[in-house]
Amino acid sequence: MIILVLLSSAGAAAAIYLVLDQRGGTEGEPQQQTLAPTPPVFTRIEPFTVNLADDRFGSRLLYTGITLRVGNEQSKAIIEEHMPQVRSRLLILLSGKQASELTSTEGKEALAQAIISRLSVPLTENQPPLDLREVLFTEFIVQ
């Protein structure tokens, strides 16, 4: 009878050990924390039309809609608060481009980098730096 009790106790102890081991119930090991991915922050710039610089085909137009992916809500708030300045900077930048510069994929990528550079210049004094991550063209028509 004593042997039966000892075997039962040993079996129960082994079962408990296996269950705790499978759960990762050892307290001596540090637990790995998984960080939840932060959702992207976007700010939309209403579509607009701009006259492009004259080329060999004469006057051309660009109709574009732009969305900016920013790194934080503070950058989004600054851009939205100063939207007239943002749009003005974009119109000045775009009006200096020729249609031939904008029709290729490389031209659009270069334009996206130029937009980031132009908008990275502070809009006001003592403005924290904007965390601009990406320029997304949601509409893009050269005519």
Image: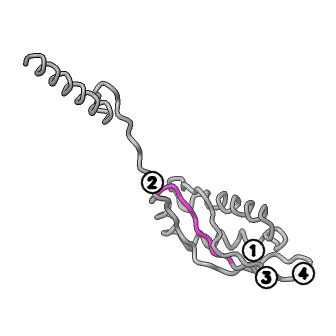
Q: Which residue is mark 4?
A: 57
Is most of the magenta stretch helix, strand or loop?
A: strand
Number of marks in picture: 4
Dot 1, crowdedness within 10 Å: few (<14), some or many (≥20)? some
Nearer the observer: mark 2 or 3; the answer is 2
Of the pair 126 and 29, the residue shown nearer to us: 29
User: Are discs 3 and 4 less than 8 Å apart at CB?
Assistant: no
User: Are discs 1 and 2 less than 8 Å apart at CB?
Assistant: no
> Residue 1's x, y, as percent?
7, 19
Determine which of the numbered discs, if any, sits on residue 95 in the image.
Answer: 1
What's the residue type where badge 2 is placed?
Answer: Thr
Dot 3, crowdedness within 10 Å: few (<14), some or many (≥20)? few
User: Mark 1 or mark 4, which is nearer the start of the sequence?
Assistant: 4
Q: Which residue is mark 2?
A: 38
Q: CA distance from mark 1 to mark 2?
A: 36 Å
Q: Which residue is mark 3?
A: 143
Residue 5 falls in image quadrant? top left
Residue 33 falls in image quadrant? top left
For numbered disc 3, what is the local secondary structure?
loop
Dot 4, crowdedness within 10 Å: few (<14), some or many (≥20)? few
Q: Residue at x 52, y 65 (%)?
A: 42
